[in-house]
């Protein structure tokens, strides 16, 4: 898959740098040549000797190396690569990229290039969530940088949340997708993702625990295959993938309006966890707490977005896929849902609290069609997305 491709791999200073050693091995297994660059901070976690041994090439470390710079080495390094991959990408290197700084070899290489750049962020959850990091992330994405992850999970510091670097095989899959064929070019795909928030009053709302991770992963996988992806997302924890058309919404009604506006499409995937109900006549003012007097909330049913699209008489997408998050009798409930809604497939999963799936980095799904219920092993949500994307190829081409 990566035969004769040259990857310039920049390892920066985070504990996840140790994963870079396995990443080098995995890339080389697939035929890629890996030219490694280490920052000074990265050398605190992995040694130049171990990196050079695995890469089979010299490790570049210094901007002002007289031997290398006699031939403007920092220019040649960046120009000779087919892809620049930064893994791990710390908050510091992302800030440098966003600001256009070039004060060491790694940042200079990233600035002095027109080669595609891909980063795999890795940092503490509070650093990842910090507004400055999110601004820098948005900036490098707008500059055309592809972003892999990060995943959510336990941190070396003992905290939990987003910021774990994607696993080496997830990064390899993204690199392969970058160089791979784009068989879905010319196909338009609609994806809904994340939760909806249904207001009770201006400060309170009804929501659910959907993170939007599976929808985002699927959007990324389909975009990597060349699809023109319209990504309608509620207020999700996980950022939308790069390379898609993002439509941000909050309520189920807004999501329905966005879906209608996106039609026609070749395929529609309804991965969003849309609230079944909303508060009828949500208050325009904050409801005040009065001792002994509980508010009465009257509910109304939200529109059924999946059913509306699946049951269209004219202009129905060639493939309509729904999701079913269940806590018991998963196959029975999901099979009944597929028949009731009229969609082609249902991707079902068990989101009981003990599974850790809702809001987690992994998924265990059952793909239900008219004739079959196919159980997949537990895997990362990125891997689920890649596998689903391949099924899309079979269905649409």
Image (cartoon, rainbow, N blue to C red):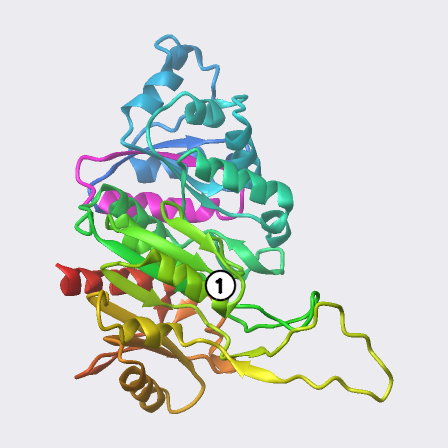
Of all residues shown, which one is farthest toward the top? 70
Q: Nearer the viewer, residue 80 or 38?
A: 80
Check if residue 22 falls in the magenta segment. Answer: yes
Residue 58 quadrant: top left
Of all residues shown, which one is farthest toward the left? 397
**Does residue 1 sit above or below 273 in this rendering?**
above
Q: Residue at x 22, y 35 (%)?
A: 5
In the image, residue 49 lies at what x, y percent?
40, 34
Q: Residue at x 37, y 17 (%)?
A: 75
Which stretch is magenta?
1-29
Residue 285 quadrant: bottom right
Residue density around tag 1, few if under 14, some if 14–19, many if 20 or more, within 10 Å: some
Q: Nearer the viewer, residue 69 or 351?
A: 351
Q: Residue at x 62, y 55 (%)?
A: 157
Check if residue 62 falls in the magenta segment. Answer: no
In the image, residue 352 lies at what x, y percent?
48, 83
Q: Nearer the viewer, residue 239 or 280?
A: 280
Q: Is residue 173 visible?
A: no
In the image, residue 205 lies at what x, y percent?
64, 71
In the visual, does 256 lie left or right of 55?
Answer: right
In the visual, does 119 lie left or right of 41?
Answer: left
**Does residue 20 sit above or below 271 in this rendering?**
above
Tell me the quarter of the image containing the C terminus. Answer: bottom left
Total marks placed: 1
**Does residue 229 sit above or below 87 in this rendering?**
below
Residue annotated with mark 1: 254
Indicate the secondary structure of the residue bearing disc 1. Answer: helix
Q: Residue at x 71, y 66 (%)?
A: 203
């Amino acid at each position: 898959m990566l035969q004769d491709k040259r990857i310039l791999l920049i390892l920066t200073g985070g504990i996840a740098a140790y994963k870079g050693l396995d990443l080098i091995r995995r890339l080389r297994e697939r035929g890629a040549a890996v030219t490694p660059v280490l920052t000074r901070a990265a050398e605190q976690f992995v040694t130049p000797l171990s990196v050079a041994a695995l890469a089979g090439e010299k490790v570049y470390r210094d901007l002002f190396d007289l031997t290398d710079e006699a031939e403007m080495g920092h220019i040649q390094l960046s120009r000779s690569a087919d892809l620049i991959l930064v893994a791990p990408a710390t908050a510091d290197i992302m800030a440098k990229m966003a600001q256009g700084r070039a004060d060491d070899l790694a940042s200079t290489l990233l600035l002095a290039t027109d080669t595609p750049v891909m980063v795999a962020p890795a940092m503490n959850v509070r650093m990842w969530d910090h507004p400055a990091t999110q601004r820098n992330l948005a900036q490098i994405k707008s500059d055309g940088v592809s972003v892999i992850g990060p995943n959510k999970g336990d941190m070396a510091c003992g905290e939990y949340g987003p910021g774990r670097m994607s696993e080496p095989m997830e990064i390899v899959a993204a690199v392969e997708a970058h160089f791979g064929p784009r068989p879905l070019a010319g196909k338009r795909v609609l994806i809904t993702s994340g939760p909806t928030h249904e207001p009770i009053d201006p400060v309170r709302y009804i929501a659910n625990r959907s993170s939007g991770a599976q929808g985002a992963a699927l959007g990324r996988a389909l975009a990597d295959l060349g699809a023109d992806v319209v990504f309608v997302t509620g207020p999700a924890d996980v950022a939308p993938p790069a390379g898609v058309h993002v439509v941000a919404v909050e309520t189920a009604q807004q999501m329905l309006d966005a879906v209608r506006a996106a039609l026609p499409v070749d395929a529609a995937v309804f991965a969003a966890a849309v609230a079944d109900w909303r508060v009828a006549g949500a208050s325009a003012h904050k409801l005040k707490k009065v001792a002994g007097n509980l508010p009465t909330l009257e509910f109304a049913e939200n529109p059924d977005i999946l059913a509306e699209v699946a049951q269209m008489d004219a202009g129905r997408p060639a493939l309509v896929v729904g999701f079913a998050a269940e806590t018991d009798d998963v196959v029975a409930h999901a099979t009944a849902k597929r028949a009731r809604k009229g969609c082609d497939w249902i991707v079902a999963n068990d989101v009981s609290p003990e599974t850790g799936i809702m809001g987690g980095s992994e998924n265990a799904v059952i793909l239900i069609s008219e004739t079959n219920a196919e159980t997949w092993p537990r895997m990362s949500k990125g891997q689920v997305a890649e596998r689903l994307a391949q099924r899309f190829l079979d269905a649409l081409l």
